[in-house]
Every structure is written in C-alpha cells, then in structure tokens.
Image (cartoon, rainbow, N blue to C red):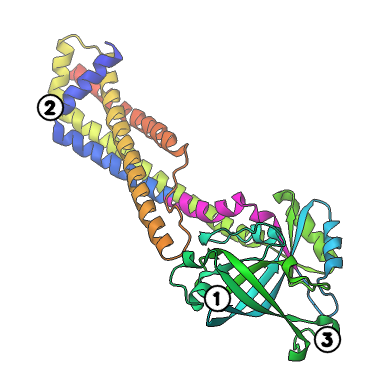
Amino acid sequence: MKNADVFKMVWASWRLNKNKARLSIAVVAFIVFVVLMIVTLGFGLAEATLGRLAQQGVLNSIDVSSPNPDSAPLTDAVVERLKLIENVAYVAPSVDYASIAKFGTATTDANVTAATGEFFANELPVMLAGTSTFSSGEASEVVVSSALVKALGYSEPGEAVGQTIDFSISVPDYNQLGGDRIAVPELLFNNIKKQVEVVGVTSETQYSLAFIPLDILGLQDKYYSVIRLVTKNQSDVARVRLSVEELGYQAVTYGDTFSDAQTIFNLARIAFIVMGAIALLILSIVAAETMTISLLENASQVAVMKRLGMDDKQVHRLYVAEALSFVVLGSAIGVIATFAVGWLINGVVYMLARDQGAEGILLFHMPLYLAPLVLTTTAVIGLVAGLFPARRAVRMRAVTK
C-alpha cells in the first residue's frame, strides 16, 4: 500500500466521523494557538525594546558627565582627551540651556539642548512630523517636542514644520563665576537670540523641549552638560567606560538598563518554554487519547481490514498516519490563526499608538523559524502519539481475526 493510499483511507475515516475529526483538529489548533500567542508576545516585547536599541547602535553609547563641574568641567579639552581613548568611534558633546520660545504673540519657557548631529542620532526620538536630523551642523534649524508646539498655539504637530520660532537662550558666562556653577547670578547670563526653522516634531507631550545644532550659538568657551561617546563595537563599551572612569569622570551606558531588561526577558523566555512544554505534553496526551478512542470505536473495522488482506504493517501505518495528519493539520491552523490574530492586533495597537503621539510598535512578533519549528515539533508529537495506539491496533486485530 502506497503512502497516498494510506492518507486516502485517513480522509475517508474523517468523512465518516466528521464531528470527532473536527473536534480533534480544533483542540490541537487551540493549544498551538495559545502557545504561539504567548511566545510571539514575548518576542514582540523584546523586539520593541531590546531589539530597537541594538539595531540603532544605542548600546554602543556612553554618556560622560563630571562628578564636580567646578573642579572638572566638561570642556573642549575634555572632548579631545576622550577622542584619544582606543575604540571610540566619535565623541558628541551637548549642553542644556533654559530659554524662552516665541511664535507670533505666544511665548513659553523651553529647555534647549544644543548638540552635534551625532549626539541626536542616538536619541531615538519618536517623530510625529518632519525629521529628527539637521541639514548641516550650522543650520538654523530646530526639532521641537509636541508639548512645545502645543504651548505655542499649534493644534497639529505638522503645522509647525517649516515655521520659524524665535528663541531667547540664556547662556551662563561660567568664566566669571569663580568656580560656582550652581547659583548663577542673573547678570552673568548672556541672552542669545536665534530665529530657527522647525524641521521636526517629536512625540514628547509633557515637556517643552527644543534641539538645535551646537554650532549656531557661536560660543567661544563651551562648558558641556554631557559628552556622549560611541564605541566602534558593542564589545568595546566596558573597556571604554573603564578608561573614562580612570580619567575621573562618570560614565553611564544604556547597557546597564539593557542588561537588567535582558535578564528579565531571558527569565520570561524560560517561563514561556516551560509553558510551551506543558502545552505540548497536553497535546501529545490529547493525540494519544484521541487515537486510542478511535481504535476502540473501530475495533470491528480492523477485523474487516484484516480479512480484506491488510497486514499488520499496513494497519500500523494507517493509525500512525491518522495521528500525524490531524496533529499537523491542527498545528497548521493554529499557526495561521496566530499570524492572523497577531497581525490584526498589531495593526490596531500601531494605529492607536500613533494617534496618541506614541511610538507604533509590533506587539506580536513571529520569527521566521518559529512556524517551521512548531510544525516539525508537533509532527514528531503526532508520530510518537500514534505509535502506541497503532501497536495496540495490531494486537487487537490479531485477536479479532
């Protein structure tokens, strides 16, 4: 008997027992669906956080600050020293200033971050409109938060792109402070007025923020708030960080948070694996039980098949094929259902997030290898689950012969 003939007989058996076949396939599909929804949710959350950081190169970043700005300020001299550290790809300084933003008759307080383009490249802002990059390091351009846009009277973020905003930026003259950088007298502030064009709006809704190129301020003596180092490879971060600390500066990396998050996700993956193993064990029990019941119900048919000339080997193949068929078919339906439901939920969540000004994410993520792995695993389960009923069928048939 050919394999095609075996599966034709399986199909004929299903047609005679439609309700039983549908229920068996539905149970398998439901188990696979539940397991895959949990697993793909875990992959989706990990991809939305850790994966995004890794892809953007943020994990290569080190933020350098001074433990005492009075005795060890972050200046251009420090920038040059940091550039000499081995395996540093580039150095990007930044400084924060208080300012007043004005558009038409509307004015509001805003925090301005002046930095190089490389610094902003690692900020990973969620953009609602426009771009997060400047056309050049000396361009009179600004990226603003949606909170600042709203405070200036715009109803939609896109309306601000291309508009001009006047900033009055308060820059402290640290050279006259005599070492005190905390309580800066008002007389020692230089108000730098800049008219800049909005090129992008971020999703930040709580704080009025503005990001401008550092060079447009024309500062002679710069005292930075943070200097960002980006290493050539992620593996260089620990060594570069140690070198920074040996120079007497504080160093913070995204990897600190990443490591904790990675531990949490690893524990979650272990929990998913355990849950999946339990579900697959249940699946194997369901498959074996279904085939055993089928065997008991069809004991008389086994005798008929024997009398028609079917030998033990062929009967064995028939029962194994039936178990394999309904498990694989149920698994395939479960995989398809997972993909469809996950895709639908992802679409809804993405649109809702974007409408609320947040970053659109894919909540459920199915790696390319997951579906073939599930189908292969369940096929093995179906094969094993059919062996015991098949052997029992051989013995029963010999008795009823």
| Residue 353 vertical placement versus 377 (above, below) | below
- Label 3 to label 2: alpha-carbon separation: 93 Å
- Name the kind of residue labelled 1 in the image: Tyr
Q: Is residue 300 left or right of residue 314?
A: left
Image coords of residue 286 (percent x, y): 28, 39
Q: Amino acid at mark 3?
A: Leu
Q: Which quadrant would the C terminus be assigned to in this image?
A: top left
3 and 2 marks in contact (CB < 8 Å): no
Residue corresponding to mark 3: 177
Secondary structure of the residue carrying numbered label 2: helix
Query: Residue under circle 2?
Result: 16
Q: Amino acid at mark 2?
A: Leu
Residue 295 in the image, given as x and y percentages of width and height: 20, 28
What residue appears at the point 73 percent right and 90 percent down from the top-left corner?
186
The magenta segment is 41-64
Q: Which secondary structure, mark 3? A: loop
Magenta-drawn stretch, dominant element (helix, strand or loop): helix
The mark closer to the camera, 1 or 2, is: 1
Q: Nearer the viewer, residue 122 or 240?
A: 122
The answer to whether 327 is drawn above or below residue 200 in the figure is above
Distance from the alpha carbon under mark 1 to that under mark 3:
29 Å
N-terminal-most mark, 1 or 3? 3
**Would you say residue 175 is visible in this rendering?**
yes
91 and 272: which one is in front? Answer: 91
Q: Nearer the viewer, residue 122 or 32?
A: 122
Q: Is residue 189 left or right of residue 312?
A: right
Q: Mark on residue 207?
A: 1
Residue 56: say if magenta: yes
